[in-house]
Amino acid sequence: MKILIVDDHDIVREGLRLVLELKKQHEVIGEAENGQQALEMLEILEPELILLDLNMPVLDGIGVLRALKKSGRQIPVIVLTTYKEKYMLLEAVELGVKSYLLKDAKRSVIYETITKVANGETWFPPDIEKAITVAKDSQANKLFLTQKELLILNYLSKGLKNSEIADKLFISERTLKNYLTVIYEKLQVKSRTQALSVAIEKNLI
């Protein structure tokens, strides 16, 4: 399998290349240190798989995924990630990535993941799958609240008083109370404390 590695850290690219080349069926045909360089390489190279970092300078992994989707090229992508980048998981999944690999993954996990993707599977490790589910739930929950309602919840979480929140939003306290009533109804709670508890549970703030 011809593979393109895209990561801004030399040590990550070198480590992956060494691991992959231990298997004769894998060939690293190119390495890019940012998304823009990767797209330029894709005009010349014909990889069968891309190992793609998300957090990179010039053009990040999400930018590469968007460009691939726009071009219509059907190249399987496995994202290289860290736990710190979980906020980008859902968008990457929506853009068609086939799997995720933590950068400190064991050699056996790397081989297994590549084999699954090569066989046409979409596969995510249990911890990554859980993070994606949480992100989807959070996104779905936020659809039920307006941007202003989410902003009010955010102010509540910071301990601001009603008068302070009203001042920040340039509305009267009476109007704010109306907003709070609607928020409580949507969250099915009866108090500020309960609202914050549910908001945290549903990843709204």
Image: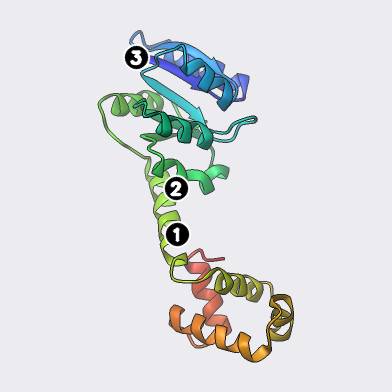
Tag count: 3
**Residue at the image position 35 percent from the left and 8 percent from the top:** 24
Distance between the Cα atoms at labels 2 and 1?
Answer: 9 Å
- The image's mark for residue 1 is 3
What's the residue type where badge 2 is placed?
Leu
Specify the farthest residue to the left: 119
| Image side of residue 66 versus residue 85, left or right | left
Expressed as whole percent of the image width and height from the top left, the position of residue 27 reads 40, 10
> Which one is closest to the eye, mark 1 or mark 3?
1
The residue labelled by disc 1 is 139
Distance between the Cα atoms at labels 1 and 3?
Answer: 36 Å
Q: Residues within 10 Å of mark 2 (few under 14, many from 20)?
A: some
- Do the CB atoms of the residues marked 2 and 1 lie less than 8 Å apart? yes
Expressed as whole percent of the image width and height from the top left, the position of residue 37 reads 57, 20
What's the residue type where badge 3 is placed?
Met
Counting residues from the start of the chain, the first of labels 3 and 2 encountered is 3
**Residue at the image position 38 percent from the left and 40 percent from the top:** 125
Above or below residue 185? Residue 5 is above
What's the residue type where badge 1 is placed?
Gln
| Image side of residue 172 versus residue 17, left or right | right
The residue labelled by disc 2 is 90
Counting residues from the start of the chain, the first of labels 2 and 1 encountered is 2
Which quarter of the rendered picture does the C terminus lie within? bottom right
Expressed as whole percent of the image width and height from the top left, the position of residue 19 reads 46, 16
